[in-house]
């Protein structure tokens, strides 16, 4: 619709749309009563099958809507320099955002699934057309992993739909339906893992690093910031509310694992430690961040599996926190550094003394690394602490391992920070063939980038200093009737 | 029964046949010296008018008649299917309006209309003899349509293959049907059902059922009887291929479902078979599974779009067979929904291929490179069709899949015996995304090759038709209620 030769108009339009989304989320938050489920829209859609167009929010979805709004605005600010096929870029970008909003808003499982799948295709095109390193491979891998995951989810959902009498797909109705125990035992892992693939559940995380690296900056920000949360949100909202008995013990143990809960917690912790360790040895700057995302998303999944309010709240908070921080990290690496230096090799960046060349980028990245390490004052600290406390109650041994993961996290963040920005070593020509780059004039950080980065830093800082802003929103939501089944299953440990 | 009654019941078919004659006559006498392009246009218009009149007749006068004890049946579900068939015929005529592979345009369009009439007779019969005759009427027209591009060896090869396989499948069908007739002493499906029920697991019944289904398996291109499909899709003139891929699928699946549900469904489950299924269901389950696996995996390695569509059609035949297996109103409604939306989508995809092939000279995947730059409208249409075939919401293909899979599970409740089939179908549709994305990758990601800088011309009529089809696919996906409501209503009334 918009004129082709006017990229500024297109950008402006996209920005206004994203801002409007953020504003809606913000107003919604202000008017929201904690613990309630506020209906946004509810009409009949396919009455023959009991499918409704049912949009509603509770505290959990509001938190994630805020995150989506922030990430969308920041992403547009950081893709201000897209010059080729600008229209199409923002068209795909906005349809991705639309899908994401839809998932977080849906209270009808069918509708949720529809939006979930709508989000897959734009990702493919954004990465394949505007991406960098091995973009077609990364894009295809991402699309196939997501689609395979959603296929697993679909099987579980259709089976649940039919079992419950094929009358309604509303989340509230289905959550009330008592599915047979044996059914829940296989449907739960199917749906959880299906969504978990998108949340970077180890060992199905391999799409994440390649996808993140291949994607253009805005897309990596969205991928790590929001899309991975779609998976975690689906785990919580669909798998855990509909099939809570799937978490029950099997009645026998293999290698000390006696339930899906044990298995998934173990996988989450492996993800935390593995992601961090692999990030420690990466040479490509963006791969460091990519693997760190896997590690941080492990916290989210671990938090979900603790099944106590601490862990669950921490988990949702971690979704928000990681969304903001990962967005920031990718923005610095992809937009501020790579678009200017055209390299992401840490060894090459070492010789460029970027802290003097790009002071703003260095400062932002330092703040983001501190937040990502989980130092107090930033959102990451609160969230990961909550998850750890929750995990300590549920799985003491695993939470110690997680602590190790946090330490490695500090190590890789510091390594990347030092190598990329604060290296004093003059590059020697043998190791770094392209060291001539250091004499290049690097264009200064532009205003949109500054604004975008500031928004994200402030968001993380705000939640870090005053986490109750979100915790008061999230906490009461776990008391809603949606989680009745889960609470009943957990029983006494739900304090 | 008198002739007026017969004529009023068979009026839509009569109109289509008359239109076919009119097209022939116009081509033969009136316009021998007129320029081919104009002749094509006029003859297409005559055909469209005939089909539209038939649709109008059925919409205006809904009928319920059963002539000669099941030989010619008209009820509301049959009328819905006929309307769908006629719509597909109109679309096929419209997209072939611009194709100049033959001088004998009149004969070509007349054959399309004849085939359409054959399909309409096919879907409105409950008598095995009449079913066989209409099947042959349709098939013979389609063989000739496949062979119509005389200038091309491929077309002849495709037609020969189609003809030989088709002839063999007709032999199978006839053999199976004759066994059933011998058993029931009647050609009526309802009476065959009684005989099948009382005969239990008599080997002759089993043989009859298996042979009949094998014959139908050929017609709907279910693996392992699919071998003709890739060559026909590839070699036949494009409009013929499009019509074979859409119209004949609708008719084929509807009549298969009808024969199974009216004729065989009463058969007792065989305890010797796993899951306690009757013979026909077990056989169809195997055909469905093989088709899904083979279609999806073979499509991955294809380098030509038409071949890719052929293998994807085999995979889709597998999904649709699931709908045949699950008996009951929701299953039949979902099958009809699926096959109609699938046919529309495929026809649209062929329409895009037709234009691209005309401009670039071939249908290799690489010929689609950069289509998004050359013709954005066409690229968007193709994206809609391909994503719908892949089953991405909010397009019709997704909803069709959801509907048919849930109906299948519902039909196999309480034990969910068909769960493995559904799980397999969903998993394989995830595989299918890979090859569908290969097409879209060429269109949107890969730039057009520099040596072939062609001035891309899309004929207005085709463009409009494709846009309308794409829009329908979107609307049927976003608001499926309208069609579903009707389908569940009419199938419940028809007792299918």
Image (cartoon, coloured by chain):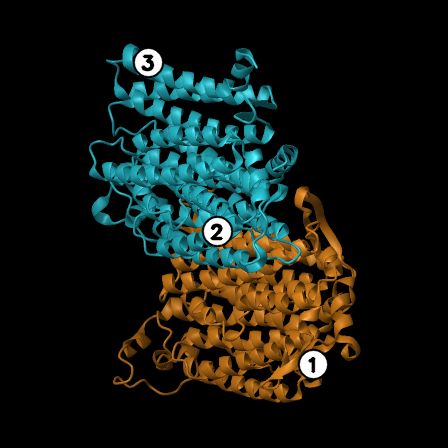
Q: Which image quadrant for residue B158? A: top left
Q: Which residue is mark 2?
A: B283
- Chain B's colour? cyan
Tell me the element at label 3: helix
Q: Which residue is mark 3?
A: B26
Mark 1 residue crowding within 10 angstroms, few (<14) / some (14–19) / many (20+): many
Tell me the element at label 2: helix
Q: Which image quadrant for residue A239? A: bottom right
**Figure quadrant of the C terminus of chain A:** bottom right
Q: Residue at x 44, y 20 (%)?
A: B16
- Residue B273 seen: yes
Which chain letter goes with mark 2? B
Q: Which residue is mark 1?
A: A390
Which chain letter goes with mark 1? A
Q: Is residue A90 above or below residue A304?
A: above
Mark 2 residue crowding within 10 angstroms, few (<14) / some (14–19) / many (20+): some
Which chain letter goes with mark 3? B
Tell me the element at label 1: helix
């Amino acid at each position: 619709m918009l004129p082709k030769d006017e990229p500024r108009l297109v950008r402006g339009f996209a920005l206004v749309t994203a801002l409007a989304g953020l504003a809606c989320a913000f107003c919604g938050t202000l008017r929201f009563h904690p613990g309630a489920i506020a209906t946004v829209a509810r009409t009949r859609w396919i009455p023959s099958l009991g499918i409704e167009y049912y949009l509603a929010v509770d505290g959990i979805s509001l938190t994630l809507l805020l995150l989506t709004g922030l990430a969308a605005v920041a992403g547009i600010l950081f893709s201000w320099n897209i010059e080729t096929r600008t229209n199409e870029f923002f068209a795909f970008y906005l349809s991705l955002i639309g899908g994401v909003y839809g998932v977080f808003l849906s209270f009808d499982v069918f509708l949720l699934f529809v939006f979930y799948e709508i989000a897959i295709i734009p990702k493919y095109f954004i990465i394949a057309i505007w991406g960098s390193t091995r973009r077609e491979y990364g894009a295809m891998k991402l699309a196939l992993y997501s689609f395979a995951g959603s296929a697993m989810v679909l099987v579980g959902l259709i089976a649940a739909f039919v079992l419950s009498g094929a009358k309604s797909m509303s989340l509230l109705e289905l959550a009330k339906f008592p599915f047979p125990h044996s059914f829940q035992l296989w449907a739960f892992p199917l749906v959880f893992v299906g969504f978990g693939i998108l949340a970077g559940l180890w060992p199905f995380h391999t799409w994440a690093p390649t996808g993140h690296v291949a994607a253009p900056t805005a897309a990596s920000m969205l991928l790590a910031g929001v899309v991975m949360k779609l998976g975690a949100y689906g785990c919580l909202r669909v798998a855990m509310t509909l099939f809570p008995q799937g978490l029950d013990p099997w009645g026998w143990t293999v290698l000390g694992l006696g339930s899906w809960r044990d298995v998934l917690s173990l996988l989450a912790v492996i993800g935390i430690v593995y992601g961090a360790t692999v990030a420690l040895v990466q040479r490509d700057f963006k791969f460091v961040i990519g693997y760190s995302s896997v590690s941080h998303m492990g916290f989210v999944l671990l938090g979900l599996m603790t099944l106590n309010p601490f862990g669950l709240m921490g988990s949702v908070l971690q979704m928000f926190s990681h969304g903001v921080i990962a967005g920031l990290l990718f923005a610095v690496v992809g937009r501020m550094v790579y678009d200017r230096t055209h390299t992401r090799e840490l060894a090459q960046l070492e010789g460029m003394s970027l802290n003097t060349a790009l002071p703003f980028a260095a400062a932002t990245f330092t703040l983001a690394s501190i937040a990502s390490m989980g130092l107090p004052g930033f959102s990451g600290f609160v969230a990961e602490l909550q998850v750890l406390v929750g995990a300590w109650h549920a799985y003491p041994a695993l939470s110690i391992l997680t602590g190790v993961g946090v330490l490695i996290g500090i190590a890789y963040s510091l390594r990347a920070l030092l190598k990329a920005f604060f290296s004093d070593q003059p590059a020697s020509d043998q190791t770094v063939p392209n060291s001539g780059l250091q004499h290049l004039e690097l264009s200064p950080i532009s205003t949109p980038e500054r604004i975008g980065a500031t928004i994200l830093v402030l968001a993380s800082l705000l939640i870090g200093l005053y986490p109750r802003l979100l915790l008061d929103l999230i906490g009461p939501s776990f008391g809603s009737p949606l989680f009745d089944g889960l609470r009943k299953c957990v029983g006494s440990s739900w304090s | 029964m008198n002739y007026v009654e017969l004529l009023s019941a068979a009026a839509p078919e009569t109109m289509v046949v008359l239109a076919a004659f009119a097209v022939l006559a116009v081509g033969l006498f009136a316009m021998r010296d007129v320029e081919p392009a104009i002749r094509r246009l006029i003859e297409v218009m005559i055909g469209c008018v005939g089909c539209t009149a038939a649709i109008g007749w059925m919409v205006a006068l809904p009928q319920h008649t059963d002539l000669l004890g099941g030989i010619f049946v008209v009820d509301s579900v049959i009328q819905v299917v006929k309307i769908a068939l006629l719509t597909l015929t109109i679309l096929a005529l419209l997209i072939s309006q611009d194709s100049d592979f033959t001088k004998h345009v009149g004969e070509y369009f007349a054959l399309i209309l004849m085939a359409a009439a054959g399909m309409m007779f096919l879907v409105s019969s409950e008598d095995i003899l009449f079913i066989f005759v209409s099947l042959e009427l349709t098939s013979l027209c389609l063989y000739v349509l496949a062979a119509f591009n005389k200038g091309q060896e491929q077309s002849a090869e495709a037609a020969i293959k189609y003809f030989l396989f088709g002839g063999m499948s007709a032999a199978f069908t006839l053999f199976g049907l004759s066994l059933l007739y011998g058993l029931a002493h009647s050609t009526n499906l309802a009476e065959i059902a009684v005989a099948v029920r009382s005969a239990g697991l008599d080997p002759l019944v089993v043989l009859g059922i298996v042979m009949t289904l094998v014959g139908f398996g050929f017609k709907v291109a279910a693996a392992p009887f699919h071998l003709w499909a890739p060559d026909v899709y590839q070699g036949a003139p494009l409009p013929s291929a499009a019509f074979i891929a859409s119209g004949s699928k609708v008719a084929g699946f509807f009549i298969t479902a009808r024969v199974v549900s009216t004729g065989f469904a009463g058969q007792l489950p065989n305890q010797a078979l796993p899951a306690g299924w009757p013979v026909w269901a077990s056989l169809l389950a195997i055909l469905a599974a093989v088709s899904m696996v083979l279609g999806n995996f073979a499509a991955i390695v294809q380098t030509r779009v038409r071949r890719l569509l052929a293998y994807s059609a085999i995979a889709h035949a597998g999904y649709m067979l699931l709908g045949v297996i699950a008996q009951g109103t929701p299953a039949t409604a979902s099958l009809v929904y699926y096959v109609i939306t699938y046919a529309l989508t495929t026809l649209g995809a062929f329409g895009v291929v037709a234009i691209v092939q005309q401009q670039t000279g071939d249908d290799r995947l690489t010929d689609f490179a950069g289509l998004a730059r050359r013709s954005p409208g066409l690229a968007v249409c193709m994206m809609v069709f391909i994503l719908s075939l892949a089953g991405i919401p909010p397009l019709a293909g997704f909803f069709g899949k959801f509907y048919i899979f849930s109906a299948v599970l519902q039909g196999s409740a309480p034990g969910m015996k068909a769960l493995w089939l559904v799980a397999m179908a969903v998993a394989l549709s995830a595989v299918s995304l890979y090859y569908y994305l290969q097409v879209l990758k060429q269109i949107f990601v890969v730039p057009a090759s520099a040596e072939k800088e062609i001035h891309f011309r899309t004929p207005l009529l085709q463009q409009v038709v494709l846009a309308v089809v794409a829009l329908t696919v979107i609307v049927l996906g976003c608001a499926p209620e309208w069609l579903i409501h009707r389908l569940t209503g009419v199938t419940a009334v028809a007792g299918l």
